[in-house]
Image: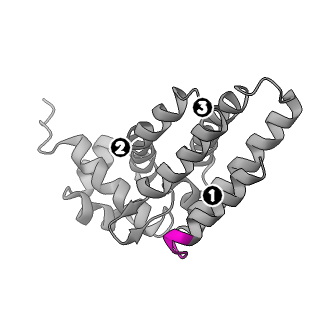
């Protein structure tokens, strides 16, 4: 007879997500996960198979958390104005008081080798492409833009967002706002 879980899975994944977000995927050990999640190694392996399984569940939880600003962009009818607001919303989303954490996905992409964890990299690329697709759909709201320009601008915005994520860890709020303003001046 299977034992009943003595913990709330969403709660422990939220804790794991925070740990990965702060420390990175590579630097986070199973022992660190045990301590942060408040469950033992057996429970981690039983529920999630391994560290990678915990991380993939953490990315799913991260997607749910970021959905508040993604949904706002998804339903925006403001084209470039809606995109600009998404960038401002992202800066707020990635902050925790005075701590600026960047983006869990961007942080992870920066630290792991592409071939080291193919399943992880696939999930990260999928997440990035979902955001890019939202950029494309908002750029299409300007019917004067050509298809190729929309694709190029979506790539440009993704590059800027990735850079903004990293910059958010070291730049002041005013500097980040300057980046956003200049980015959207050029669209």
First in sequence: mark 3 vs mark 1: 3
Estimate the x, y position of residue 167 in percent, counting from the top left: 59, 69
Q: Which mark is residue 98?
A: none
Whether residue 172 appears in magenta in the rendering, the answer is yes
Q: Nearer the viewer, residue 56 or 161?
A: 161
Whether residue 47 appears in magenta in the rendering, the answer is no
CA gap, disc 3 to disc 1? 16 Å
Residue depicted at x 35% and y 43%: 48
Given the current orientation, which residue lies at the most extreme top position? 143
Q: Is residue 160 left or right of residue 61?
A: right
First in sequence: mark 2 vs mark 1: 2
Q: What residue sits right under mark 1 in the picture?
A: 180
Magenta-tinted stretch: 169-174
Estimate the x, y position of residue 139 in percent, counting from the top left: 71, 33
Q: Nearer the viewer, residue 163 or 173?
A: 173
Q: Is residue 115 left or right of residue 51?
A: right
Q: Nearer the viewer, residue 2 or 159?
A: 159
Q: What residue sits right under mark 3 in the picture?
A: 78
Q: What residue sits right under mark 2 in the picture?
A: 48
CA gap, disc 2 to disc 1? 38 Å
């Amino acid at each position: 007879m299977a034992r009943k879980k003595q913990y709330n899975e969403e709660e422990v994944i939220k804790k794991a997500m925070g740990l990965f977000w702060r420390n990175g995927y590579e630097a986070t050990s199973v022992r660190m996960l045990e301590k942060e999640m408040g469950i033992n190694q057996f429970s981690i392996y039983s529920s999630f198979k391994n560290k990678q399984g915990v991380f993939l569940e953490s990315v799913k939880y991260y997607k749910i958390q970021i959905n508040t600003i993604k949904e706002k962009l998804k339903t925006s009818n403001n084209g470039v104005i809606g995109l600009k607001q998404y960038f401002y919303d992202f800066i707020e989303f990635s902050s925790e008081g005075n701590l600026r954490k960047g983006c869990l996905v961007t942080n992870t992409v920066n630290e792991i080798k592409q071939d080291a964890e193919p399943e992880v990299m696939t999930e990260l690329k999928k997440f990035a492409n979902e955001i890019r697709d939202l950029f494309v759909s908002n750029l299409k709201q300007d019917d004067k833009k050509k298809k190729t320009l929309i694709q190029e601008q979506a790539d440009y915005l993704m590059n800027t967002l990735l850079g903004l994520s990293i910059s958010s860890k070291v730049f002041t709020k005013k500097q980040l706002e300057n980046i956003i303003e200049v980015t959207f001046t050029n669209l």
